[in-house]
Amino acid sequence: MIDLYKNPDIYDQLVPWGLREDEPFYLASTAQIKQPVLELMAGTGRLTIPMAKQGVNITGLDLSKEMLAKAETNAKQAGVNIPFIHGDATNFQLNKKFGLIIIPASALLLLDSKESIEKCLKCAKDHLLPGGKLIIDVITLACIEKTPRDNKFKTHRYTSSSGKDVDVVLTDFQYDSAEKLFSYNFLPQDTVSGQEIRRDKVTLKMYTPEELRALLYQQGFNISKEYGDYSRNPFHHQSMHQIIVCQPN
Ligand SMILES: C[S@@+](CC[C@H](N)C(=O)[O-])C[C@H]1O[C@@H](n2cnc3c(N)ncnc32)[C@H](O)[C@@H]1O
């Protein structure tokens, strides 16, 4: 487990709620669902909480106890009650089934091997109600090609608990094409001194669009929709995201 996922307060500052364009997509995807919904790798509730607020019967599962504790605090502050479950997305048994399971924010790529993804998809399939769907959402290799290597870019600014203004910078983009590992650092820095406050490395195991589709087919899923962005434009080879809606065959 990377350090960032043991520091949920930092996570909530570095990956700010409200700046991400995936939220309207998931709110629209769950708006009409009457059956329970499960978010795997749910983190601090960035998406589960707005969904619960719109009346979705949502459960969140995550491996980090720290992220879950913060999710509970965030949910309480938002006035919603969400079951947050401690569990491994590659090996869980909840004794409950869902009409929709979602794995947003490229979280699937945090699993370190093809085998882990297979296990995760199998568990997800076992937890779907008849007619239930799975949505997975990952960044693409085309997105990495467009990422400025050796460059830094600032994503946003926040005020820390000690009252200092902090710029969040993404930096040190690297792609190991042999291992298909994409990594970068979150680098919060003091806006006045420019001093680095901490450095959090995120590593994603990348797949081609075809590999991801093959993994789903092998685990018994049929793909019904494939989008290239959160506005639901069709997927094409230059798409920055691969967002797949699928169901067990
Ligand atoms: C990028 S965050 C996404 C959190 C949330 N879905 C969001 O969009 O803000 C990835 C999350 O996956 C969790 N995670 C990593 N490996 C996991 C695993 N094997 N099982 C369950 N959760 C896992 C981490 O603890 C972290 O909270």
Image (tube, rainbow, N blue to C red):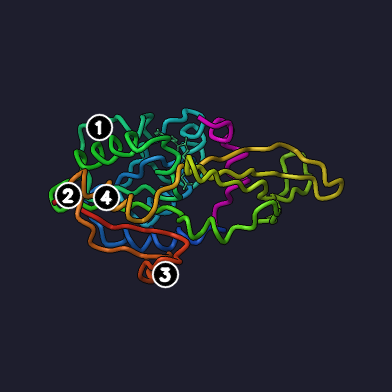
Residue 201: percent from the left, percent from the top?
A: 61, 38
Query: What is the distance, in whole Å, between disc 1 and disc 3 at their CAs?
Result: 32 Å
Q: Residue furthest bottom?
A: 233
Q: Quadrant of ligand 1?
A: top left
Residue 194: percent from the left, percent from the top?
A: 83, 47
Query: What is the distance, in whole Å, between disc 4 and disc 2 at their CAs?
Result: 14 Å
| Nearest to N terminus: mark 4 or mark 3 | 4
Which label sits in the foreground, 2 or 1? 2
Whether pointer 1 and pointer 4 mark residues with C-beta atoms closer than 8 Å, the reply is no
Which label sits in the foreground, 1 or 4? 4
Query: What is the distance, in whole Å, between disc 1 and disc 4 at their CAs?
Result: 27 Å
Query: What is the distance, in whole Å, between disc 3 and disc 2 at their CAs?
Result: 25 Å
**How crowded is the residue under tag 2: few (<14 C-alpha within 10 Å), some, or many (20+)?**
many
Mark drawn on residue 214: 4
* The quadrant where residue 233 appears: bottom left
> Magenta region: which residues?
1-18
Which label sits in the foreground, 3 or 2? 2
Foreground: 201 or 206? 206
Q: Is residue 70 above or below residue 146?
A: above
**How crowded is the residue under tag 3: few (<14 C-alpha within 10 Å), some, or many (20+)?**
few
Q: Secondary structure at mark 2?
A: strand
Which label sits in the foreground, 4 or 3? 4
Which residue was labeled with disc 2? 248
Residue 100: percent from the left, percent from the top?
A: 26, 50
Instruction: Say which residue appears at 66% left-offset and 56% top-offset.
Output: 155
